[in-house]
Structures are given as C-alpha cells and as structure tokens.
Image (cartoon, grey):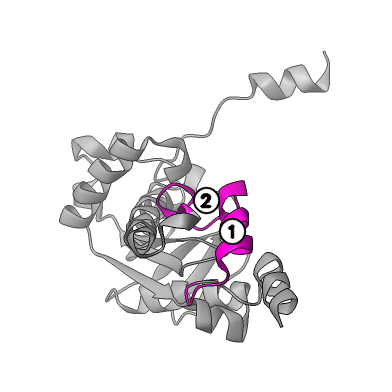
C-alpha cells in the first residue's frame, strides 16, 4: 500500500488524560500562541483540570484550538476559565525584539505557570522546556494528546485573538481582526503602504525590511 494512503488512514489524535495520569500530584497543561505573527504579543496559558472535575460535560469537546470553530473556542473559553484554575500571560513585541521569540514564548509559559499555585508537574506543548520550579514534561503536538494542554491552547488563543481584534479598531488597515497579526497578503500590503506600528515586532524579517527601506 502506498505510504500516502497509509497516512490518510491514520486516525486523528484525540486528547485525553493519559499523560496527566502518569504523574502524582497537581498536573497542569501549558501552551502558547502567537510565535509566528508580525504584530502583537505572544501569549501563554496554564490550566489545571482537577481530577474530580473531569466528568464535566464540556470536557469531551476540548481539543487543539486550531481544530475548533471560532464560536466553539469562545464557548469553551468561558467554561474552562469558570471551572478550572488557570493563568494567562503575554509578552510584548518590545520584549520579543529584545530577547527573541523563542525566549519570549518560554518566558510567557514560565509566568503563566508561576501564577497558579501548587503545581507539581507541567505538561508543556512542544519540545522546548521553560525554566520552571516544578517538573517539566515536553510533549510534541501536546494539544492533540493532553486535555490540559488543549485547554491551555484554547484560552491562550481566544485571549490573544481578543487583543488583536481590539488593536484592529485602532489600526484597521492591517486586518488584525481576521489575520491576528500573521503575515497575510493584506498585512504585508498594509505594512508597505502605512508603515510599522508600535505593535509590530521590529526584529521579524518583513517588518525589519520595511524599517530598513524607510531609513
């Protein structure tokens, strides 16, 4: 059988609590959003789903935020933040330019985790570990494997999208309400026509080239 056909038949990953159950004590999930955009902050979230709340009906709907509709993400955001301990942190474009986007992402994860008390183990999406006081377990594609990480991905994305939607009211030409600061065609054209805003990441290539061209 062709390899491509085999890949097409591979079942989609559904997050569960298998990873959480490997560890004793309080386990959180941590994820970040916004590493790729040219504008706006990078945002991280930390979520703890207590064992006695795992049977709440909406739990089965939690999955990777990218696989959810806009309305479903917002509905789940309200449920997650109502029922579970959580924290959200953001790192500004200025700080991103100062320390680079990877370090800014790790810093956002660290800050969000430190805002939640009593964490013994942190399941972190990706393969880079933030410097935490608790034990860190990195999980590649974690938002498709761990419900806690998936929950963190949802609230981080909704929170960041809300920031970009508000900024779009002040800077409507860039389309941030629809592209969330990512380098879409509309965003690039607006950069060329209207220039760099205080919310752009000046160390990112497309923005840096505009700045250098104007100097």
User: Which image quarter holds the C terminus?
Assistant: bottom right
Label placed on residue 1: none
Name the spot of residue 56 as percent of width and height, x first: 19, 40
Secondary structure of the residue carrying tag 1 is loop
Q: Does the magenta stretch include residue 214?
A: no
Q: Which residue position is annotated with label 1?
A: 126
Which residue is depicted at the point 66% across and 70% down? 204
Which residue is depicted at the point 35% across and 56% down? 165
Q: Which of 187 and 147 is in front in this view?
A: 187
Give the left or right position of residue 78, taking residue 128 as reference: left
Name the spot of residue 10 as percent of width and height, x first: 64, 24
In whole angstroms, how far apart are the C-alphas of marks 2 and 1?
Answer: 7 Å
Q: Which residue position is annotated with label 2?
A: 142
- Give the magenta part as a residue range: 175-199
Q: Nearer the viewer, residue 109 or 104?
A: 104
**Total marks in image:** 2
Q: Is residue 195 magenta?
A: yes
Which residue is depicted at the point 71% across and 25% down? 7
Residue, far left: 82
Which residue is depicted at the point 30% across and 77% down? 115
Q: Which of 193 and 43 is in front in this view?
A: 193
């Amino acid at each position: 059988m062709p390899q491509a056909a085999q890949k097409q038949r591979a079942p989609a990953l559904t997050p569960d609590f298998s990873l959480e159950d490997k560890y004793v004590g309080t386990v959180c999930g941590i994820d970040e959003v916004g590493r790729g955009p040219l504008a706006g902050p990078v945002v991280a979230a930390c979520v703890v789903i207590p064992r006695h709340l795992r049977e709440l009906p909406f739990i089965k709907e939690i999955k990777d935020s990218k696989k959810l509709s806009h309305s479903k993400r917002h509905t789940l955001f309200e449920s997650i933040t109502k029922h579970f301990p959580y924290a959200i942190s953001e790192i500004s474009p200025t700080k991103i330019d100062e320390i680079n986007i990877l370090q800014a992402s790790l810093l956002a994860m660290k800050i969000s985790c430190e805002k939640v008390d009593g964490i013994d183990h942190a399941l972190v999406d990706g393969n880079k570990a933030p410097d935490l006081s608790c034990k860190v377990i990195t999980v590649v594609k974690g938002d498709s494997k761990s419900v806690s990480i998936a929950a963190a991905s949802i609230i981080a994305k909704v929170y960041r999208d809300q920031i970009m939607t508000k900024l779009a009211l002040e800077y409507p030409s860039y389309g941030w309400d629809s592209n969330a600061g990512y380098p879409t065609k509309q965003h690039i054209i607006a950069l060329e026509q209207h220039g760099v805003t205080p919310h752009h990441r000046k160390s990112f290539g497309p923005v840096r080239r505009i700045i250098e061209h104007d100097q």
